[in-house]
Amino acid sequence: MTYEYYSPPMSYDEIVATQGEILKDWVIGDWQGDYIYLLKKDDKYSVVVIGYGSCSGCDVLQACESDEDFNSLKEDVIRTIVWVTKEDILNDLDDEELNRWYFHEEEWEDIKKEIKEILA
């Protein structure tokens, strides 16, 4: 039996870049974690977080087995992008309720500082 491996036509970076300019990106984690993107489109900004894993069992992109799977994932990623003002991003960075899932990540504090510097 021969297994045909599906190769998605785009990476997470490329999917996100279809929606705006990536001003900066970060990776939190090793075998699994989060890709974080600071995006800009016109005068609006977004912070996009995409969880990743090291295998098809824990990473949605790697689990894609067809163009249909990929297109569904791409649509899901695009739907998560919320465009707001620079001021909204800066105000939301320190909102503990919005950012509660990052408390275990030491890198998140450094990322917040970098975002603040970039948007200053």
Image (cartoon, rainbow, N blue to C red):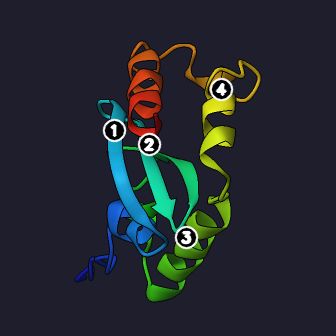
Report if residue 61 is visible in the image. Answer: yes
Q: Which residue is mark 2?
A: 36
* Label 4 packing within 10 angstroms: few (<14), some (14-19), many (20+): few
Q: Which residue is mark 1?
A: 26
Element on which disc 2 rests: strand
**94 with respect to 60 (left or right):** right
- Residue type at numbered disc 3: Leu
Does the CB distance between marks 1 and 4 fall below 8 Å? Answer: no
- Residue type at numbered disc 2: Ile
Say how many tags the image has: 4
Q: Nearer the viewer, mark 3 or mark 1?
A: 1
Does the CB distance between marks 1 and 2 fall below 8 Å? Answer: yes
Q: What is the C-alpha distance between the residues marked 3 and 2? A: 17 Å
Residue lying farthest front? 120
Looking at the picture, how far across and down is residue 92, in whole percent? 68, 31
Task: Tell me which label, 1 or 4, sits earlier in the chain.
Answer: 1
Q: Residue at x 43, y 21 (%)?
A: 113
Residue lying farthest left? 2
- Residue type at numbered disc 4: Asn
